[in-house]
Image: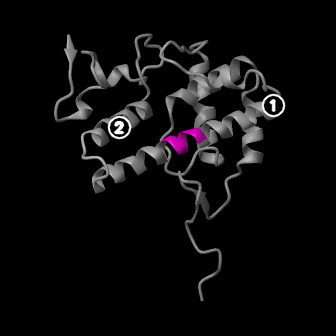
Amino acid sequence: MLIISGNNPYSSFGATLVRDDEKNLWSIPHDVSHTEADDDRILYNLIVIRNQQPKDSEEWQKLNYDIYTLRRTRREVRNRWKRILEDLGFQKEADSLLSVTKLSTISDSQNTRKAREILLKLAEETNIFPTNWELSERYLFVVDRLITLDAAEEFFKMASLTYPKKPGLTYLADGHKELSHLPFPSP
């Protein structure tokens, strides 16, 4: 049965089959029927809402900027990962290692815990992801592939060197620096 989104663009992901909405959006990596990642859904919903607005209205312009910013941020994060993969010697394989589709699976279920730990460690101890970035499940698949290639720890080391976490300084999604505290002592 097809559902066409009416007034609520969040009710479905376009015209899709009725499904177990929340659990079918990559929240269960072993679910072979998963469709799109949450960040894909957010982007799609922003586009749907924008397209319902009168073109060039203030709301349309705001949504258009949000769409542009989200796409740019995703591209920036992907480029950071690609740069590290290439620095590790995966010049020819970088694009395929970063390619995650709805058919992607975790190679070994025992790797899932380790991949999640490394991904969280990357988020907490490096600036490979912007500060306000929600971790995307797609990078769990990439880390799983790196574990299989025995390159996950080297990737983390390279990310730590290339995108170190600096105390008092965080990077926002738009690439601008944000001071969490002043670098000078208070009088």
Q: Residue at x 63, y 21 (%)?
A: 144
Q: Amino acid at mark 2?
A: Ile
Residue 184's spot in the image, x, y percent? 65, 79
Q: Residue at x 48, y 48 (%)?
A: 69
146 relative to 5 in the view: left or right: right
Residue 125's spot in the image, x, y percent? 65, 47
2 or 1: tag closer to the N-terminus: 2
Point out the stretch of residues depicted in magenta: 71-75
Query: Could you tell me which quadrant the C terminus lies in?
Result: bottom right
Q: Amino acid at mark 1?
A: Leu
Q: Is residue 91 above or below residue 185?
A: above
Q: Is residue 74 above or below residue 92?
A: below
User: On the image, numbered disc 2 is attached to which residue?
Assistant: 47
Tell me, yes or no, whether the highlighted magenta stretch contains residue 170: no
- As measured in the structure, the alpha-carbon distance from the residue carrying label 2 to the one carrying label 1 is 36 Å
User: On the image, numbered disc 1 is attached to which residue?
Assistant: 88
Residue 174's spot in the image, x, y percent? 54, 53
149 relative to 9 in the view: left or right: right
Query: Could you tell me which quadrant the N terminus lies in?
Result: top left
Say what secondary structure mark 2 lies in: helix
183 relative to 71 in the view: left or right: right
Q: Are marks 2 and 1 in contact (CB under 8 Å)?
A: no
User: Main SS type for the magenta part?
Assistant: helix
- Colour scheme of this structure image? one colour
Viewer-closest of 20 and 96: 96
> Badge 2: how crowded within 10 Å, few (<14), some, or many (20+)?
some
